[in-house]
Image: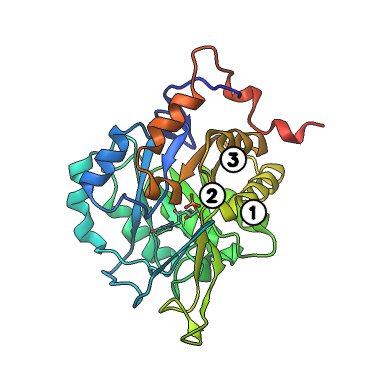
């Protein structure tokens, strides 16, 4: 097993304590849960996605557990600006706010609520099951660039989270980079569905959802690998990571850090367990491993 050195580092202009970050929408739904996961060894935590207006989300069923992950169609439920007291409870240190909007102006408006309250912003341009938001606008490189550029005007570090549900993810990565993104997060969930045989209809209330968990790890890894070849801003790998070996593979593909979602939902103690496995004082420097799988 390759070991890394734990410690504070800057990833896309955001200070993190180690490489292991809580992904958006999983556990980070209240100030207390953000604090709990931060205290349990995560290098930083990302909130659930917050949008311009309160949203109740899709009708159920919203989640299908599978042996290899889960499919969700939450529909971005969120309390909008009523979430701000939760952020204030958690404090800005190692906290990144995930935000969404339907246009560059909406994105900027939501971003402005978080000035001085968080360490950075993550733009959700990638949710596969929210009409008018997420991937439905984030698969257009021009919109990705415009939203990024607009939010950057608020002066906070900006990470842009991309959808894998496009033919060429590097087009959106390059658009985020052109718009001034400090880092790219790849990937959000993969559009998916299941059908109930007895009911003869889709299982999810929304019919389609997003697949997460170990099933998508090879897709996420491929996206990070392609983005590393095309872009020159930091990449945060996300999608199906559940072991410290997955973290090493992601870094070899080009990620400087990772986000963990489904596996953290299943076991909130994963950050401590992974850190115990991954870190060692005699570990190697990040530069020896990040992107090394491209050098042959
Ligand atoms: C129940 C659930 C809710 C999620 N909510 C959000 C969200 O609010 N914003 C977002 O950008 N991604 C959201 N995601 C996507 C995750 O942050 C992550 O990108 C995806 O699940 C892939 O990582 P994983 O396989 O480690 O879970 C959600 C995923 C799940 C399973």
Measuring 38% from the left and 35% from the top, which residue is drawn there? 42
Residue 43 visible from this viewpoint? no
Q: Earlier in the sequence, mark 3 or mark 2?
A: 3
Which mark is nearer the camera, 3 or 2? 2
On the image, numbered disc 3 is attached to which residue? Answer: 233
Q: Residue furthest top?
A: 282
Let me know if residue 113 appears in the view: yes
Above or below for 1 versus 148? above
Q: What is the crowding at mark 3: few (fewer than 14 residues within 10 Å), some, or many (at least 20)?
A: some
Looking at the image, which residue is at 55% across and 69% down? 192
Q: Which residue is drawn at 33% across and 72% down?
A: 57
Tell me the quarter of the picture where residue 7 sits: top left
Mark 1, other Cα within 10 Å: few <14 / some 14–19 / many ≥20: some
Q: Horizontal and vertical percent for residue 247?
A: 56, 36
User: Mark 3: which secondary structure?
Assistant: loop
Point out which mark residue 240 bears.
Answer: 2
Q: Of 169 and 179, which appears nearest the observer? A: 169
Determine the CA span between mark 3 and mark 2: 22 Å
Return the x and y of residue 69 as percentages of the image width and height: 50, 57
User: Where is residue 218 shown, x and y percent of the image?
Assistant: 65, 50
Q: Mark 3 near ligand 1 (CB under 8 Å)?
A: no
Q: Are marks 1 and 2 in contact (CB under 8 Å)?
A: yes
- Which of the numbered marks, if any, corresponds to residue 219? 1
Mark 1 within 8 Å of ligand 1, using the beta carbon? no
Using the numbered discs, state the Cα–Cα distance from disc 1 to disc 2 in whole angstroms. 9 Å
* Other residues around mark 2 within 10 Å, as few (<14) / some (14–19) / many (≥20): many
């Amino acid at each position: 097993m390759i070991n890394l050195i734990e410690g504070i580092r800057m990833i896309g202009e955001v200070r993190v304590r180690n490489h292991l970050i809580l992904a958006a929408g999983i556990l980070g739904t209240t100030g207390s849960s953000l604090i709990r996961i931060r205290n349990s060894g995560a290098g930083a935590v990302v909130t659930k996605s917050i949008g311009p207006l309160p949203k109740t989300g899709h009708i159920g069923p919203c989640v299908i557990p599978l042996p290899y992950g889960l499919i969700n169609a939450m529909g971005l439920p969120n309390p909008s600006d009523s979430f701000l007291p939760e952020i204030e409870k958690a404090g800005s240190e190692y906290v990144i706010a995930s935000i969404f909007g339907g246009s560059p102006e909406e994105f900027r408006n939501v971003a402005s609520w978080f000035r001085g309250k968080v360490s950075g912003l993550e733009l959700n341009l990638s949710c596969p099951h929210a009409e008018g938001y997420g991937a439905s606008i984030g698969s257009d490189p021009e919109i990705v660039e415009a939203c990024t550029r607009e939010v950057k005007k608020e002066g906070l570090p900006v990470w842009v989270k991309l959808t894998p549900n496009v033919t060429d993810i590097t087009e959106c990565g390059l658009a985020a980079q052109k718009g001034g993104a400090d880092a790219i997060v790849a990937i959000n969930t993969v559009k998916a569905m299941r059908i109930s045989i007895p009911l003869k209809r889709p299982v999810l209330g929304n019919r389609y959802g997003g697949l997460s968990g170990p099933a998508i790890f090879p897709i996420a890894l491929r996206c990070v690998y392609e983005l590393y070849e095309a872009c020159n801003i930091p990449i945060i790998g996300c999608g199906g990571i559940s072991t410290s070996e997955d973290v090493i593979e992601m870094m070899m593909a080009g990620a400087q850090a990772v986000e963990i979602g489904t596996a953290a939902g299943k076991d909130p103690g994963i950050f401590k367990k992974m850190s115990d496995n991954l870190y060692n004082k005699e570990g190697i420097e990040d530069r020896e491993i990040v992107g090394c799988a491209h050098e042959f």
